Amino acid sequence: MVVNGYRFGPVAWWAALLAVVLLVLPSSAWAASSCDLALTPPVPGETVRRFSPAYEGGHWGVDLASPWGGTVRAPVSGTVTFAGRVAGRMSVTIAPAERLRVSLSYLSQLWVSTGQWVEVGGALGRSGMDGGLPAVHLSLRIDGRYVDPEPGLACDTSTDNLWGRLRLVSTRRAARQRLR
């Protein structure tokens, strides 16, 4: 292929196309199209409010139905980087990797503390309310930018399909496994 007098072979053409796609697509669109970050649902309820950053001042995550006082579980393994109150609501933030943050809000009780390591599925606290709605808010940040966490919840994380889990092995867990 010839573009502006430059001749591109098939490999160079595909590499150039990939570079353009990666530069043009925002990180949220890229994250939403893959299962690179599989999230285990923190509560068994369905989504009652979707990710909508541009609507009514922004909703930067998803709300999942949960009866008040239900157990909220870690959607990923990682280090708790925050456990406390934000705008009067109890929240927990987990760092599964250096540039990733997974947060859960609208909790009525916290059972973890900052600096603590949590395993996926581990109990974090109890669910609470948001404006009269019993729910848990789940948000995901990649490099400080909020992205829709719902595609990660839709990934099959069963033992039959390990695709999403293969990319989530933490450095701490991998180091422990290498030492065995």
Image (cartoon, rainbow, N blue to C red):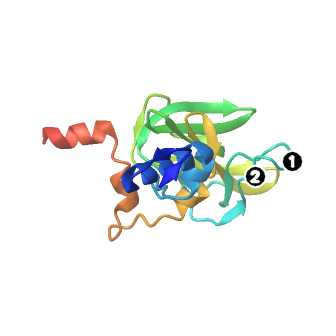
Q: Quadrant of the C terminus?
A: top left
* Residue at 57% from the left image edge and 60% from the top image edge: 151
Distance between mark 1 and mark 2 Cα atoms: 9 Å
Nearer to me, 33 or 91: 33
Using the image, tell me which numbered label, if any, was put on residue 18.
none
Within 10 Å of disc 1 (Cα), the crowding (few <14, some 14-19, many 20+) is few
* Residue lying at 51% horizontally and 40% vertically, measured from the top left: 111
User: Which residue lies most toward the bottom here?
Assistant: 160
Q: Position of residue 29 (x, y in %)?
A: 61, 52
Task: Pinpoint residue 61: horizontal percent, then vertical percent.
Answer: 67, 49
Label 2 secondary element: loop
Up/down of 109 relative to 144, above or below? below
The residue positioned farthest toward the left in the image shown? 180
Q: Is residue 140 visible?
A: no
Three-letter amino acid code at disc 1? Glu
Amino acid at dot 2 = Ser
Q: Mark 1 points at which residue?
A: 56
- Residues at badges 1 and 2 in contact (C-beta under 8 Å)? yes
Give the residue at mark 2: 52
| x 39%, y 46%: residue | 119
Q: Nearer the viewer, residue 140 or 105?
A: 140
Classify 7 as above or below 44.
above
* Residue farthest along the right direction in this orientation: 56
Residue for point 30% across, 36% down: 172
